[in-house]
Amino acid sequence: MQTRRFVLAHRPRGVPRETDFRLETVDIPAPQDGQILVANVYASVDPGIRARLGEEATYAAPLQIGETVEGATVGRVVASHNPKFGEGDWVAAAFGWSEHGLSDGRGVRKIADLRVPPSAHIGVLGIPGLTAYFGMLDIAKPKEGETVVVSSAAGAVGSAAGQIATRSGARVVGIAGGTDKCNWLHDIGFAAVIDRRAEPDLGVAVARACPQGVDVVFDNVGNSFLDAMLPLMRIGGRIVVSGQVADYNTPAGERPGLCNTSHFITSRLTMRGFVAFDYFREFPKAWADITQWILDGKLKYRADIDEGFEKLPSAFIGLFNGDNFGRKLVRIGLQI
Ligand SMILES: NC(=O)c1ccc[n+]([C@@H]2O[C@H](COP(=O)([O-])OP(=O)(O)OC[C@H]3O[C@@H](n4cnc5c(N)ncnc54)[C@H](OP(=O)(O)O)[C@@H]3O)[C@@H](O)[C@H]2O)c1
């Protein structure tokens, strides 16, 4: 049997190009004792993958040339020699940009509860939603009456992070690119929204939207933005470094730094970065909470789905231009 996959062909310089990825058709062996074969139905594209395409080691090793590009997947078991899985089961995994996945079951999660669509299990119930959940509830800990600013607020992580802060009674201000995204954020309960494409100076725009100052910044974007936020922070403010989408395409050594660091002293600020996997053991509670909030209509999410396996590179590249409106997925075309 054969399957298609995208591998890294070249290490990108700057914004990735489609030619940095190569489509290959390879043989896939029949599953052996203990293994399952999964036909992937959706694969994700994630800004953080960009960090693995360079030579620099991050919390994960760089992807090697010729290796399958990383991505979360949702699919169905098409053959099982593992008693924990049956044919037809929906599973969430990380088989990458590949039509199929072969596994002994480790790292594969059976989706037993289908009240929320399978694709959401790599979105609001996947790493993006878990990043929002733990970053907000364990690190930022917003309180009633506090002001929270979320960057890339209409994205998979940001939209969940903002709504979780709103649940805590905070006043949440979101930053997003374009009128449609901003209107949606108003609709899902953000107190104020700033269109980054319409504002020449985000520091000025956030100061205007937050006249009492800012208690929490949940940042998905990077250092230029963070530096503009530091003078606006109130005493005891918390900065959660979730991601740096604006900086991923800039080589190490050329990325913007932080200048306004005196505010860490005067305003007694705390800044903490994290990786959602740090909270691995607590995922089941987060899944239960997020599922309930979705079913109660208290947590809204969007999926932005391209059709066709060959769309994976363009969908990924579009993330760095704000083309996606919600969790970006590609339907691989093997719906069964
Ligand atoms: N720490 C963790 O464990 C963890 C896990 C998952 C993701 N993350 C991080 O969380 C962040 C969001 O990820 P996501 O999957 O939810 O992606 P996303 O926010 O859905 O998509 C990326 C968005 O970033 C914004 N953007 C792109 N280039 C930008 C620029 N130069 N300046 C400002 N904004 C820009 C665009 O939104 P607008 O058009 O609205 O500006 C774009 O739509 C990323 O930085 C990612 O690496 C962290």
Image (cartoon, rainbow, N blue to C red):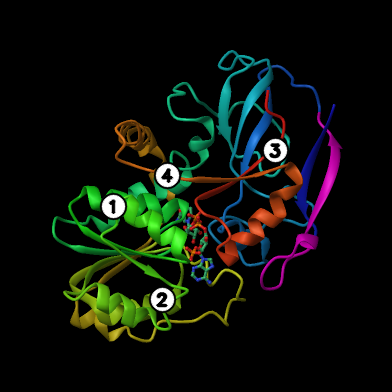
Mark sitting earlier along the chain (4/1): 1
Choose mark 1 or mark 2, whichever is in front.
1
The residues colored magenta run 10-28
Mark sitting earlier along the chain (2/4): 2
Circles 1 and 3, Cβ within 8 Å, touching? The answer is no
Q: Is mark 2 within 8 Å of ligand 1?
A: yes
Q: Which residue is mark 4?
A: 301
Residue 230 placement (x, y as % from top left): 30, 78
* Left or right: 335, with 277 as reference point: right
Q: Which residue is mark 2?
A: 225
* Left or right: 167, with 50 as reference point: left
Mark sitting earlier along the chain (4/3): 4
Which one is nearer the viewer's eye here, 199 or 248?
A: 199
Q: Secondary structure at mark 2?
A: helix
- Residue found at x 37% / y 49%: 160
Distance of mark 2 from mark 3, alpha carbons?
A: 35 Å
Q: Which residue is mark 3?
A: 332
Distance of mark 1 from mark 3, alpha carbons?
A: 33 Å
Choose mark 2 or mark 4, whichever is in front.
4
Distance of mark 4 from mark 3, alpha carbons?
A: 21 Å
Q: Is residue 13 magenta?
A: yes
Distance of mark 1 from mark 2, alpha carbons?
A: 23 Å
Mark 3 surroundings: few (<14), some (14-19) or many (≥20) residues within 10 A: many
Which one is nearer the viewer's eye here, 177 or 29?
A: 177
Locate the C terminus by quadrant. Answer: top right
Which one is nearer the viewer's eye here, 309 or 289?
A: 309
Q: Which residue is mark 1?
A: 189
